[in-house]
Amino acid sequence: MRLGIYAFFDPEGIADVGDIYYLSAVAAEVDRLIIVVNGEISDGTYKNLARFSNEIHCRENKGYDACAFREVLLRHLPKETWSSVDELVLFNNTVFGPTRPLAPIFQRFSSASVDFWGMTLNSTPDLNYSTRLIPDGIAS
């Protein structure tokens, strides 16, 4: 079972189109998604996030994303469910993209003999930023 924990923060509590696009791409690759919000969010943002998970936890914006992940693991995910988690995907809303499908990346690392992996670089030197990356139908 692949569990995703998404840490969200925006000073105005608003998820923009890019946040929703990124969340939708990763949500398609996990079996269960828990969303943790650092701070407060607008009603519209709550509704947008709820399209991907019914597990949304709002917390004080203290300790940044690492403490948000910790809080979910220790307070909102019972220890007896930990053994059913094969992969843990920790991600936040500070990412631009994805610029290509995520499924091949997750497939590659699911079969790899690694304990930890992360994506930090984009190896697409010819990325055309004028290309429409956000599909129609996704609104902020």
Image (cartoon, grey):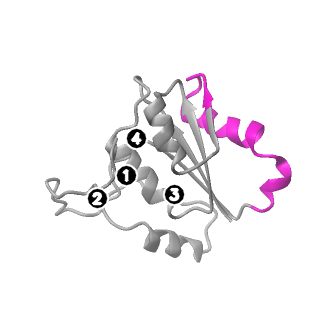
Q: Magenta residues, as a range?
A: 58-84
Q: Earlier in the sequence, mark 4 or mark 2?
A: 4
Q: Which mark is residue 76?
A: none
Instruction: Tell me whether the residue at label 1 lies in contact with that at label 2, contact meaning CB atoms closer than 8 angstroms.
Output: yes
In this rendering, would 14 be left or right of 49?
Answer: left
Q: CA distance from mark 2 to mark 3?
A: 16 Å
Q: CA distance from mark 4 to mark 3?
A: 16 Å
Residue type for callout 3: Ala
Q: Earlier in the sequence, mark 2 or mark 3?
A: 3
Q: Which mark is residue 135?
A: 2
Q: Residue 87 or 133: which is nearer the viewer? A: 133
Where residue 55 sits: x, y (%)?
A: 64, 44
Residue 19 in sight from this viewpoint: yes
Q: Residue at x 50, y 75 (%)?
A: 108
In this rendering, would 114 be left or right of 78?
Answer: left
Q: Residue 28 or 116: which is nearer the viewer? A: 28
